[in-house]
Amino acid sequence: SYDYNVYHTYDEIQQWIADTANQYPNLARKSFFATSTEGRNVDMLTIGKSTDKPIFLIDCGVHAREWISPAFCQCFINRMLSQYGVDPQVTRMMDEMTWMIIPLLNVDGYEYTWANDRMWRKTRSKYDTFCTGVDANRNFDINWSGEGASTEPCSNTYCGPSVESEPVVKALSDIIRKYKGNIQGYIAFHSYSQVFVYPYSYAYEDTENAAQLNDVSSRAASAIQQTTSKIYTFGPGYESMYLVSGGSKDWAYQMGVPLSYTIELRDTGKYGFLLPESQIDGTCQEMFQAMIVLAEEAITNT
Ligand code: 0X9
Ligand code: ZN
């Protein structure tokens, strides 16, 4: 059976998505999400008992080198599917919400981290003679190309030649536009630094529900500490070390998603992006407890 405690290649993840949908036909559905710049398929798994409940949208693997992110999406989905009808909390999460999850968004970049450069971050689109790639988390339609993004193609935070120039960013934006009003929660999983980041990141400004976002992340962080003793911090993006323009969670919030987060998974810098596989399980355990808190908030918010 599938080993959730190792990192998998793009091909293995694609196969896993198909196998998972086949294994749980009543709880999971695979759909085409996007074709990447280099022509790879990006798939989405929609999971839940019904497909018409309020939506929780999750993406993993926006930044190629943050391997723990797609690993988390896979173990999260596996736990939801395998514990349905067994664990009452999972059953409630699956009964009351429709989960739309893209386990690996930046497929081209991810493939490149396996084949060529483990520390690659961006997509693999070529808009420049010398430098490749766009930072997918600077390519959304929120203060695009503003502070905290670079217009220089060689920069690791290059915002791209235009808004939604990246096919995977366009596809994620399209799905948020399509289900606008029905999406209660949105999370982009990144690494590293163990932090719950909520809007805004593009400006020194608080959202109308800042107190709620703060309270929810505080409770999620407590749940984590009780599970693995790991410390996660939380706060608005502008409070962290740098501003970010064109990021997905600011854009999702602006489109009406009340609970919108970037979550930075393990660790705090010892291994950084090169998090050992031995820490996948602990990361999954702790973040699952946080997801229970976030899901409950999303359910009672509706
Ligand atoms: O820079 C980013 O896109 C995110 N960090 S990462 O190391 N995963 O690349 C941070 C996005 C959250 N916003 C802020 N920290 N302001
Ligand atoms: Zn990232």
Image (spheres, grey):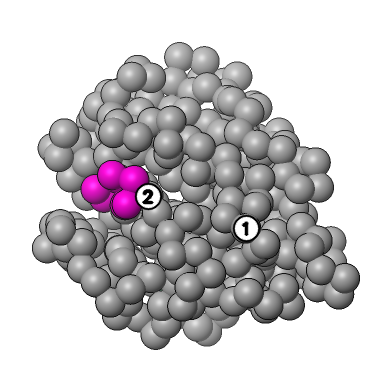
> Which class describes the residues within 10 Å of circle 1: few (<14), some (14-19), or many (20+)?
few
Q: Which residues are magenta?
A: 253-259
The percent position of residue 189, horizontal first and vertical second, equals: 46, 57
**Marking on residue 162:** 1
Mark 1: C-beta under 8 Å from nearest atom of ligand 1: no
The percent position of residue 217, horizontal first and vertical second, equals: 22, 62
Secondary element at tag 2: helix
Give the camera-side residue of 72 and 198: 198
Residue lying farthest to the top in this orientation: 26
Three-letter amino acid code of the residue under disc 1: Ser
Residue lying farthest to the right in this orientation: 129
Left or right position of 11 against 93: right
Residue 161 inside the magenta-drawn segment: no
Q: Earlier in the sequence, mark 2 or mark 1?
A: 1
Left or right position of 7 against 260: right
Q: Quadrant of residue 229?
A: bottom left
Q: Quadrant of residue 296?
A: top left
Give the camera-side residue of 33 and 149: 149
In the image, what residue occupies the spot 39% across and 62% down?
Answer: 263
